[in-house]
Image (tube, rainbow, N blue to C red):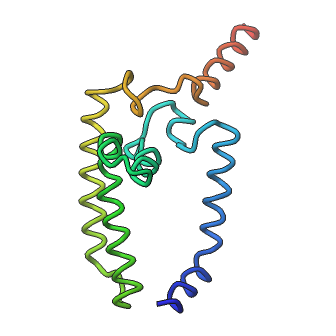
Amino acid sequence: MWELIKEDIHNYWKAAVFLLVATVILIVCFDGACISRIVVGLPCPACGMTRAALLFLSGHWIESIKMQPFFVIFAVGVVMCAGKRYIFRKKVGRWIRTYIWIMLVAAILFYIYRMVRYFPHTPPMTYNKDNLVFYMYYYICKIWKAVV
């Protein structure tokens, strides 16, 4: 098991460091890690996943499921993949593709439901007015008025 973990760390450490650095930069510079919220101000289908993970890990399981029910389903998938890879020493295989597709379709349908039901008044389904598209539009209009 440990040799597989070492092999995976050796193969994927650059990607892990990149994701960590990118997340820190987003949090420090934009006060959040969600690119969708930063760029267009809208929550993404995974919105609330980090908060759900923190709630789950701190023992607030019901609140975690209310925040983002797909965190638990995602965590089960990660545990299943890790178990198959590191404990049973088998390739994850084709079943993970089916699992991912089912998760994606279900997450998008749930996202649409949450956008209709909770947007923009209930966290995490709120609008970020300090988004980049808004600022670009604002400054383009300001420049346009100055020119014309």
Residue depicted at 24% across the width and 51% down the height: 106
Quarter of image, res 129? top right
The spot of residue 147 in percent (x, y) is: 75, 11
Task: Give the answer, above or below, for where 69 lies relative to 38.
Answer: below
Task: Give the answer, above or below, for where 78 lies relative to 89.
Answer: above
Front one among 52 and 17: 52
Front one among 139 and 10: 10
> For the image shown, how many numbered marks are present on the structure?
0
> Quadrant where the C terminus lies?
top right
The spot of residue 94 in percent (x, y) is: 28, 78
Is residue 77 left or right of 20 when viewed as pictured? left
Is residue 8 left or right of 30 when viewed as pictured? left
The spot of residue 47 in percent (x, y) is: 42, 42
Task: Give the answer, above or below, for where 42 lies relative to 4.
Answer: above
Residue depicted at 64% across the width and 44% down the height: 26
Front one among 39 and 52: 52
Front one among 60 and 33: 60
Task: Give the answer, above or below, for where 85 lies relative to 123.
Answer: below
Is residue 76 left or right of 18 when viewed as pictured? left
Residue depicted at 57% across the width and 36% down the height: 38
Residue depicted at 64% across the width and 17% down the height: 138
In the displayed orientation, state which residue is furthest to the right: 147
Quarter of image, res 85? bottom left
The spot of residue 103 in percent (x, y) is: 28, 57
Quarter of image, res 137? top right
